[in-house]
Image: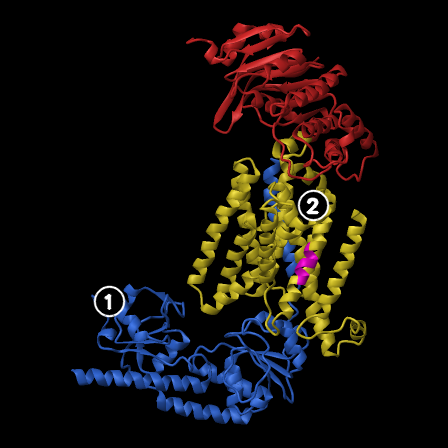
Amino acid sequence: MKTGIKILLFTAAACGIFVLCVSAGSVFISPFRIPEILSGGAGSVEYRILVDLRIPRILMALVVGASLSVSGVVFQAVLKNPLADPYTTGVSGGAAVGATVAIAFSMSYFLVALLAFGGSLCAVSFVYAVSRYRGLSGTALVLAGIALSVLLSSAVLLVFAFSRADYVHKALLWLMGDLSIAKYAVVMRMAVVSLLLTGLGFLYRRHLNIISFGDEFAHGLGVSRGDIVNLFWIASLLAAISVSLAGVIGFVGLLVPHVMRFMFGPDHSRLIPASALGGAVFLMGADTLGRVLVPPYDIPAGIITGFAGGLFFLVLVIRKGGAYT
Amino acid sequence: MNLFTVDSLRAGYRGKEVLHDVSITVGAGEFAAIIGPNGAGKSTLLRSLSGYIAPSGGDITFMGKPVASYTRREFSRELSVVPQFTETDLSFSVREFGELGLFPHRKFFDVGMSSGNEIVDIALEAAGISHLGERNMMEISGGERQLAYIARALVQSSSVMLLDEPVSHLDISHAIRIMDVLHSQNRQGTTVITVLHDVNLAAEYCSRIIALKEGRVFADGTPREVLTYEKVEELFDTVCIVTENPISKRPLVYPVPGFLRGGG
Amino acid sequence: MRIQWHAVIAPLVAAAALIIIYTGDDDGEQVCVPRNVRRVVSLSPSVTREIIDLGAEEMLAGVTSYHPPMKKKVPVVGTILHPNVETILSLGPDLVLYSEEDSAVQHAERLAAAGLCAVSLGRNRNFEEICANYLRIAELIGARDAGREKISRYRALLNVARVTEKRCTVAVFIAHTPLVAASEGSFVGEIIADSGGINVVKDTGIGYPILSAEFLIAVNPDVILSIMPGAAEFFLSLSGSAPGLRATEKGQVYTINERHLAYYTPGDYIAAVREIAALLKKVVKQDENRN
């Protein structure tokens, strides 16, 4: 199938899924009635549901999904591992510790996000420093990240041990990913920051192609250590911002780039925009599924993506025997 | 004018110094081979020349300036490197892979380079793989892939090429094909410095052989000067016979198997 | 050195980004005054119970999944920690009540943002605070007089049930593995104090700390209470051979009814005090008979 047609079909499907997601929820609002509801003014309940609740939440899913996917794409290139996940560098572990501490001390949502972000950055900086000592090789980054993740999980459990039961419950819910507290102001600003970072990543698209072939190869072609550092931070920031605002939503950064690579090839000039769109749609769909499966209960998006991701890789292993695409 | 000047070089990896005192010069247009036993420091020397490893002592200059003083981009425009290992699980087409060689020549923000296409065409032609342009890198044979690596290097720089064991894992026909490509490039003016395992290939194709042993220069000169049986025996610590290739008149080294040495 | 510069600037830029994203975001506290409240959604089981207690059960338009027994089936709007804001909106309530004690505050903020009148009730750390919240609920749903009357009656009942003289030392557990006890400063601790018990687990800032078996043996209370079933057997096996626990030796380990402890209402508070006071009185009597 020609790439042009693939892109068209893909975008059309994305739009269709978007409309479906806006309609779906604990109250189904038919897509054909949406224009009249929106123009009808702030009075109706359905208007408030759409405008105050659903649309910001969907926008947040789009932004977070895109950010996590792009982060995954960049990490997979820098770590030279198509199975790398944005969380392998300690991003989620650090955020988990920060958020758990904030929740245990009953802090406001803003402070929870801020501490999560701070924790994220501390973890990433640590992993970076340790692996820089070892020349910033892909393996060093992964190992340092894994080691730190284990430490941080224990730290989270330690905080749990000393907290009230409902704080533990709250923290666990946060850890599962929660998009329901989306607000326009926050989402819009996050979108701007993510767009900037993704744009920067896109400027590095050729570097990313080259890095994937090996350290010495990339060095020989003129990709400097500084370039790799920049890319590392772009990916880490995208992931850290996503985690601090939406909790730990896994597999988006792992699964989407994988699928996009299969559909559009490994060239990052196509892979980056495709992953951004794919991630956005994937998370939006997962979040919507969480909303409609067992109303009125909301299944956290992170659980849906976790199941989807696990199943996907199981199928992959069975069909391909473990080889990447 | 000397392309590379290496003076009392000491270099190695974290915790281990591999090269202890290497001084050589390589002039433009040479076809030089670096040979030696395993662990002698051949790859280390090549990586020092390419700037991938920083020297821990001594100097390396390229075209008069220290290698470290070049920015990565500048340096990559002047010479290309074909490392020993390249990760290959990426499904680029041969042509797309070749285009990667244009990277150091592009401006950071530019969208595309139209003249680049011609350069890629010429390089694929020179490597003899024009017909493989649209094929996927993962689907072609090992030998063809190696030719693709060389094509990419040609795209990047056709003035200086550094290669680390380009043919060690290939069958004779592909090995010869690659050496032929390098030879023909050298004829057109490309300086080629390559690490080679096979001393006979080095003897046939190269104008200069640098032999390393235990991190030092053991011998340096033309194949005939370096490949005498005494030198080869001492270099590789094994019994051998050196004769002459009847066609090219270059030295030809035969190792003598242990069971024929009769208790020696 | 270029690389170190990156490592410092990047986090600063990142922090700036996050602060930009997040500040200027507080849309300010809006205090709504509900009038003619007819439909109420309660996001706290205790509040639900109090509304029923005030005789206003028909007003309940939505409750949380964990809720007290009710006469009619009322739509569930989600869990305590994660109520579904869309569902609540579609029920069209005049008032949404939630408690700082157990509700997810940020979801309540979404309610306010969506134009609903959402009112939060404060913590329930002791009987006085419970009463204050009770009266507030009564006022909000337009049952002020009924509320006042009930509260004065409850206060009277508590004065009767309350035991001022301290009778014996007590440890109260809300979990066995790990051993989670109610300390003096906690809500359950207040009930114990009002029941005439001396809590061996002093107030250290953590309301419900995890204890080690060693600590329990060291403080050796007269009575051990637990909300978990099978308390007697559990603590018997815990004390093992030697040195034993006084409470297990004398058979003064009891499982108490958690039904009343789960709700922060005046009625439940008094019922809990009554139950535990009676228990402790029995213990003291048994002790006296023994000696």
Q: Position of residue C127 (x, y in %)?
A: 43, 82
Residue B2 colored in magenta in the image: no
Q: Position of residue A52 (x, y in %)?
A: 70, 71
Of all chains, the one bearing label 2 is A
Please name the color used to draw chain B. Answer: red
Q: Quadrant of residue B186?
A: top right
Q: Residues within 10 Å of mark 2 (few under 14, many from 20)?
A: many
Task: Report the span colored magenta.
Answer: A279-285
Q: Tell me the kind of residue under disc 1.
A: Gly
In this rendered view, identify the residue nearer to me: A276 or C260.
Answer: A276
Secondary element at tag 1: loop
Q: Residue at x 70, y 51 (%)?
A: A275
Residue C240, disc: 1
What is the letter of the yellow chain?
Answer: A
Residue B160, compared with residue C11, is above or below; it is: above
Q: Quadrant of residue B91?
A: top right
Q: Is residue A275 left or right of residue C106?
A: right
- Say which of marks 2 and 1 sits in front: 1
- Compute the Cα span from label 2 to label 1: 64 Å
Q: Tell me the kind of residue under disc 2.
A: Gly
